[in-house]
Every structure is written in structure tokens, then in C-alpha cells.
Image (tube, grey):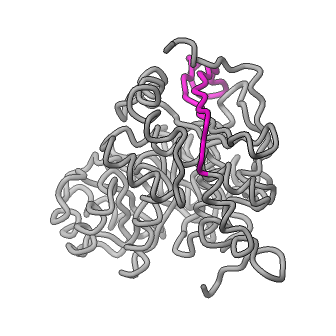
């Protein structure tokens, strides 16, 4: 694929070891682990419940080969750590354990037939399986996803709903740390929103990427008015300006502005994306792997976008480096990605079980180690298998 490259030379690793992939998908152990962390910094202190999931290979492999997955367990999206554990034991156990599959996609296909919703735990399961396969092949995860397109990606940082002058100060502070991509949260006060974009642009200069995210807060006419005014200050992108459930209204907005329009909440499934594309409603789609059901679904969405000249963007929520490493491998192997990556919100999480993924000069470098490429420390976690026996 043009623009993509894979590290190393000679015969591809995946071609040599196709047989190992099928063997790796005979799993004999699943371990749900509860993480109880704390948030710090500007985020309010609170329990940060999440669900980490691991898959272990069978006896034919050397001891200690484990794949890890992570679900943010967001109540807002209808999931929690206890619900994820219950689904693993009640629904997914019979699908996953002591069976052989030709590959991860066939596992996810069967999971989809057993579990329509609960996208976060499906992401965690698929991440664990892919991490396990890549470790057995001794290759970075991106090589199982199509190969490396971007060895590093600029991190987009969010700017909260403050007064325009305060937002500009925050943007300047981020600029000094090397960040070049900013997303302003907007939607409560159109006048304030336009003033904030103006203030940030004047503070950081013309070469920086600025987007706004209304989280569905505007009416169509409000969106058109705000976006066109912000365009005077070189706004680069407007994310989900109106309600998610009507592609025709998104198309109405897009036809009347010069700034690219990106869907987020309105793009949860490949069918959602197809409807948006058919309505000529979007220039880009934001993909959150944990919110669309995993890597396979994410690649389906990316393929639809690529075939229709629609760009893609990777986004997330405050969570462990363990989750963000998987999303970074996905983004780095997807050539239609643009606008940086929203994968740098792991700093507020104390006692993160994963390490080895850090922001340097406003960028994330793709880990080159086997699998996810991060180190996992479970000393502050609690296995919950016994709770269900």
C-alpha cells in the first residue's frame, strides 16, 4: 500500500508463521482483572474503575505468554467493570475457551452473534487476542493490522469550556510543550465559542491545527453560524456539531460551511458511516475502537471511508496506556488518518498498569516491541475470577 512501510527486511514474518496464528487462538484461560485507580491533576479525584482482560496460550507454548486487553468501563456508554466481568463469564466464556479458530476475525464474528452491544468488552477481548498473536510472532501489533504507515503521531489535546483568554493561555502552555493539535470544547455559548477560537488562533499562530467539538450541542443553524464565523480564524475541523441521528441535517450543515465536518457520536457502526457517506454529510469520521466494538469493526469503518474519499481520525477517553497502545497501533496502520491522535489522556490515571508509552514533544511514537509493546504491572490489580465461582 502506497505510503505505508513495515520495519525489517526479507520475507514477511506473517508469511512464515501463518500456522502459529491458528494455534495461538486455542485459548485455555481468561482472567478478568479489576483495576481501581485514581485520577489526578485537573481531573477531579475519583475511583477510575476499569476492566483489564488477559488471554493465555495453551500448554504447548512456553509459560508466561499473555495477551492483554483493556476496557474503559464507561457508565455513560452503558458498561462498567462488574458488567464486563459478568459478560465474560456468562456470555463469552463458551465462545473463547478451549476452541480453535483460524483467526481473530472469526472469533469476533461469533462474538457479534452472541453479543450485539457491549462494545467496550468486545474491544478488550480482541485487543488481548491480537496482543497474544503478535507476541507469539514476535512482531509489533501494527503488522497484524496492515503494516506501519506512521512511525509517530502528533497528539491532539483538548481545551475545556473556559473563558476565551483562559483557553488561549492553556493552548500556549501546550504549545511550549510541543503540542501542535488542539480541540476546543464548544456548544454552550456560540459567542464565547467564536471568541475562544479567535483567541487560540492568535495565541498559537497560523501553522497549528485547531478543531472544535460541540458534542451534538448546536442546532443546524447555530452550527452554520458558528462554523462560518470560526472559519475567519482558520478553523481546521468541526466535530459532531449537531444531533447524531439525522444524516440529512449533517449534510445540510456541511453544504453551507467551508470547514470540514467530522462525525463522532453519529458514527458508531459501519452502517452509520455508510448512511453518512450516502448523504454527503461528512468529510471525516472519528473512530473510537472501544466504542465501535474493536479492531475488526474499526477497520471496516476505515475501509468504507477510504473507498469514499473520507478521512479518519482516532479518538479516545481518559484511560490506561494499555488501551491507548492498541488504538495507536490501529491508527498508525491506517493510511486515511489525519488530525493527529486523541490518545494522550492517560496522564490523569494514577497507578496505570501499563508503561512504555509516553508523549515526547507533543507526539506519540509507535511501540516497536512485540504485541502492544508496553510493559504491564498487575501489582495494583485484583483478579476477580473467584468472584464468579
Residue at point 65%, 40% (across, down): 68
Q: Decide which of 122, 247 is in the foreground and name it.
A: 122
State yes or no: residue 36 in magenta.
yes
Q: Decide which of 214, 116 is in the foreground and name it.
A: 116
State yes or no: residue 264 in magenta.
no
Q: Position of residue 40 (x, y in %)?
A: 66, 24
In the image: residue 361, left or right of residue 172:
right
Q: Which residues are magenta?
A: 25-53
**Residue 221, placed above or below residue 169:** below
Q: Decide which of 40, 78 is in the foreground and name it.
A: 78
Secondary structure mostly seen in magenta is strand
Label tally: 0
* Residue at the far bottom in the pictured view: 2
Q: Decide which of 153, 173 is in the foreground and name it.
A: 153
Q: Position of residue 287 (x, y in %)?
A: 45, 57
Q: Quadrant of the N terminus?
A: bottom right
Residue at point 78%, 55% (across, down): 370
Residue at point 56%, 40% (across, down): 166
Residue 320: image quadrant is top right
Residue 235 in sight here? no
Q: Position of residue 364 (x, y in %)?
A: 72, 56
**Residue 225, placed above or below residue 98:** below
Q: Position of residue 293 (x, y in %)?
A: 42, 49
**Residue 255, placed above or below residue 323:** below
Amino acid at each position: 500500500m502506497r505510503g505505508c512501510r513495515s520495519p525489517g527486511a526479507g520475507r514477511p514474518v506473517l508469511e512464515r508463521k501463518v500456522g502459529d496464528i491458528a494455534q495461538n487462538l486455542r485459548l485455555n484461560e481468561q482472567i478478568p482483572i479489576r483495576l481501581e485507580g485514581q485520577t489526578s491533576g485537573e481531573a477531579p479525584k475519583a475511583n477510575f474503575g476499569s476492566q483489564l482482560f488477559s488471554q493465555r496460550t495453551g500448554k504447548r507454548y512456553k509459560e508466561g505468554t499473555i495477551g492483554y486487553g483493556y476496557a474503559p468501563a464507561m457508565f455513560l456508554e452503558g458498561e462498567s467493570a462488574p458488567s464486563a466481568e459478568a459478560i465474560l463469564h456468562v456470555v463469552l466464556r463458551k465462545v473463547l475457551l478451549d476452541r480453535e479458530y483460524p483467526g481473530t476475525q472469526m472469533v469476533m464474528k461469533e462474538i457479534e452473534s452472541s453479543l450485539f452491544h457491549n462494545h467496550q468488552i468486545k474491544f478488550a477481548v480482541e485487543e488481548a487476542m491480537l496482543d497474544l498473536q503478535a507476541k507469539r510472532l514476535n512482531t509489533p501489533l501494527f503488522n497484524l493490522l496492515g503494516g506501519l504507515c506512521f512511525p509517530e503521531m502528533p497528539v491532539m489535546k483538548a481545551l475545556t469550556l473556559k473563558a476565551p483568554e483562559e483557553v488561549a493561555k492553556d493552548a500556549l502552555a501546550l504549545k511550549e510543550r510541543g503540542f501542535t493539535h488542539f480541540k476546543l470544547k464548544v456548544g454552550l455559548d456560540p459567542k464565547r465559542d467564536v471568541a475562544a477560537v479567535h483567541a487560540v488562533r492568535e495565541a498559537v499562530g497560523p501553522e497549528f491545527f485547531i478543531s472544535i467539538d460541540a458534542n451534538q450541542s448546536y442546532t443546524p443553524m447555530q452550527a452554520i453560524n458558528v462554523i462560518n464565523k470560526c472559519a475567519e480564524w482558520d478553523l481546521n475541523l468541526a466535530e459532531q456539531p449537531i444531533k447524531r441521528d439525522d444524516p440529512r441535517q449533517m449534510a445540510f450543515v456541511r453544504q453551507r460551511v467551508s470547514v470540514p465536518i467530522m462525525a463522532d457520536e453519529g458514527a458508531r457502526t459501519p452502517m452509520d458511516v455508510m448512511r453518512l457517506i450516502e448523504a454527503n454529510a461528512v468529510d471525516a469520521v472519528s473512530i473510537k475502537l472501544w466504542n465501535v466494538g474493536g479492531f475488526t469493526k474499526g477497520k471496516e469503518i476505515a475501509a468504507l471511508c477510504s473507498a469514499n474519499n473520507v478521512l479518519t481520525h482516532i479518538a479516545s477517553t481518559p484511560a490506561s496506556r494499555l488501551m491507548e497502545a492498541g488504538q495507536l497501533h490501529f491508527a498508525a496502520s491506517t493510511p486515511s488518518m489525519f488530525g493527529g491522535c486523541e490518545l494522550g489522556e492517560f496522564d490523569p490515571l494514577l497507578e496505570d498498569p501499563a508503561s512504555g508509552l509516553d508523549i515526547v514533544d507533543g507526539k506519540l511514537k509507535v511501540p516497536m516491541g512485540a504485541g502492544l509493546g508496553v510493559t504491564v504491572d498487575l501489582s495494583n490489580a485484583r483478579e476477580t475470577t473467584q468472584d464468579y465461582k
